[in-house]
């Protein structure tokens, strides 16, 4: 019997995949040779989601942090590779948060 309490693969994951693809398109079509920073990643994610939750938090959870120099075009390629499995990354992040909240001694803050 199929569970009905979780979105089907055709629902929620598509929106994350679409957001990542849109983000990749923006980066690859607008000065792809320029450097792209993590601060810019945060800004683009906010702009794409208009800061609306839970989309904003979910997009940030699946769009990899930038920890080394990368161009806009290179990051766009990375986003396109992540997009098909975005729903898995989002679910893993949510599962981790749920587990962390139940740990003994957890005080409700983030690490």
Image (spheres, rainbow, N blue to C red):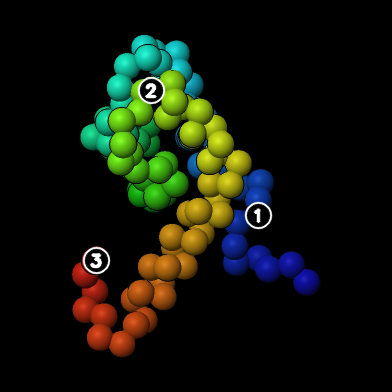
Task: Estimate the x, y position of residue 27 in percent, counting from the top left.
Answer: 41, 21
Q: Which type of secondary structure does the marked residue at label 1 adopt?
A: loop
Counting residues from the start of the chain, the first of labels 3 and 1 encountered is 1
Tell me the quadrant of the picture where the N terminus can be found. Answer: bottom right
- Are dots 2 and 1 in contact, CB under 8 Å? no
Whether residue 10 is visible to the viewer of this picture, yes or no, is yes
**CA distance for labels 2 and 1:** 32 Å
Seen as rendered, the residue at the extreme front is 68
Q: Which residue is mark 3?
A: 110
The label number, if any, that marks residue 8 in the structure image: 1
102 to 76, vertically: above or below: below
Counting residues from the start of the chain, the first of labels 2 and 1 encountered is 1
Looking at the rendered structure, the number of numbered marks drawn on it comes to: 3
Q: Which residue is mark 2?
A: 72
Residue 9 in the figure: left or right of residue 77: right
**CA distance for labels 3 and 1:** 29 Å
85 to 43, vertically: above or below: below
Task: Estimate the x, y position of residue 52 in percent, counting from the top left.
Answer: 34, 43
Residue 97 in the figure: left or right of residue 109: right
Q: Residues within 10 Å of mark 3 (few under 14, many from 20)?
A: few
Give the residue at x 32% y 16%.
34
Task: Estimate the x, y position of residue 81 in percent, counting from the top left.
Answer: 56, 36
Seen as rendered, the residue at the extreme bottom is 104
Seen as rendered, the residue at the extreme right is 1
Task: Estimate the x, y position of residue 83 in percent, counting from the top left.
Answer: 55, 39
24 to 61, vertically: above or below: above
């Amino acid at each position: 019997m199929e569970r009905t309490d979780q979105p089907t693969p055709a629902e929620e994951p598509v929106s994350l995949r679409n957001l990542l693809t849109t983000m990749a398109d923006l980066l690859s079509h607008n000065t792809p040779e320029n450097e792209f920073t993590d601060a810019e990643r945060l800004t683009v994610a906010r702009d794409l989601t208009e800061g609306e939750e839970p989309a904003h938090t979910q997009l940030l959870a699946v769009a990899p942090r930038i920890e080394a120099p990368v161009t806009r075009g290179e990051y766009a390629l990375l986003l396109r590779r992540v997009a098909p499995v975005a729903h898995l990354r989002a679910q893993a992040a949510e599962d981790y948060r749920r587990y962390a909240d139940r740990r003994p001694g957890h005080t409700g803050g983030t690490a």
